[in-house]
Image (cartoon, grey):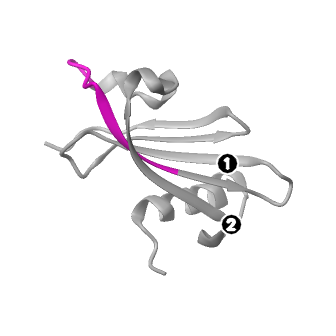
């Protein structure tokens, strides 16, 4: 199975930054469009937005490691754009990484 760039980012970040090594088989993935009122505020790249859209597209990745720690990675996209605007990782529901990415014009 070929990894998406979102999955590669998630697995590589867990390995390099948090010393957690998982395979793509350990990860559940869902791509969804969510209203900004439906997500925690750290899932909204408000620093980039002058006019807040009603929704963002998210690729959400969920995995559990051998110590039963739940890792959730999310990459956010603006509707009709391919570049990422936000990367987030949580560990057992706590925010541990949040990168707001500049929009490419």
In the image, taking residue 30 as reference, residue 49 lies left or right, namely: left
> Closest to the observer: 26 or 89?
26
Rendered view: 94 above or below 64: above
Res. 49 image quadrant:
top left
Residue 44 in picture, x, y percent from top left:
41, 27
**What residue is at 47 percent from the left and 31 percent from the top?**
43
Residue 17 disc label: none
In the image, taking residue 3 as reference, residue 84 lies left or right, namely: left
In the image, taking residue 69 as reference, residue 24 lies left or right, namely: left
**What residue is at 44 percent from the left and 58 percent from the top?**
6
Residue 90 in picture, x, y percent from top left:
63, 39
| Disc 2 packing (10 Å; few <14; some 14–19; many ≥20) | some
Q: How far apart are labels 2 and 1 at the CA level?
A: 10 Å
Do the residues bearing badges 2 and 1 touch, measured as CB atoms within 8 Å?
yes
Q: Which residue is mark 2?
A: 22
> Closest to the observer: 94 or 55?
55
Element at badge 1?
strand
**In terms of sequence position, does the residue under pointer 2 or pointer 1 come before the other?**
2
Rendered view: 40 above or below 69: above
Residue 99 in picture, x, y percent from top left:
46, 38
Q: Tell whether position 91 is magenta.
A: no
In the image, taking residue 100 as reference, residue 1 lies left or right, namely: right
Residue 71 disc label: 1
Q: Which residues are the magenta region?
A: 49-60
| Disc 1 packing (10 Å; few <14; some 14–19; many ≥20) | many
Q: Tell whether position 51 is magenta.
A: yes
**What residue is at 59 percent from the left and 59 percent from the top?**
28
């Amino acid at each position: 199975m070929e990894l998406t760039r979102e999955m590669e980012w998630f697995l590589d970040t867990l390995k390099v930054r948090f010393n957690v090594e998982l395979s793509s088989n350990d990860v559940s993935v869902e791509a969804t469009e969510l209203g900004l009122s439906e997500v925690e505020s750290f899932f909204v790249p408000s620093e980039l937005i002058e006019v807040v859209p009603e929704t963002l597209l998210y690729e959400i990745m969920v995995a559990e490691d051998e110590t039963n720690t739940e890792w959730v990675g999310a990459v956010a996209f603006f509707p009709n754009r391919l570049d990422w605007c936000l990367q987030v990782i949580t560990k057992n529901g706590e925010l541990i990484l949040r990168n707001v990415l500049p929009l490419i014009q």
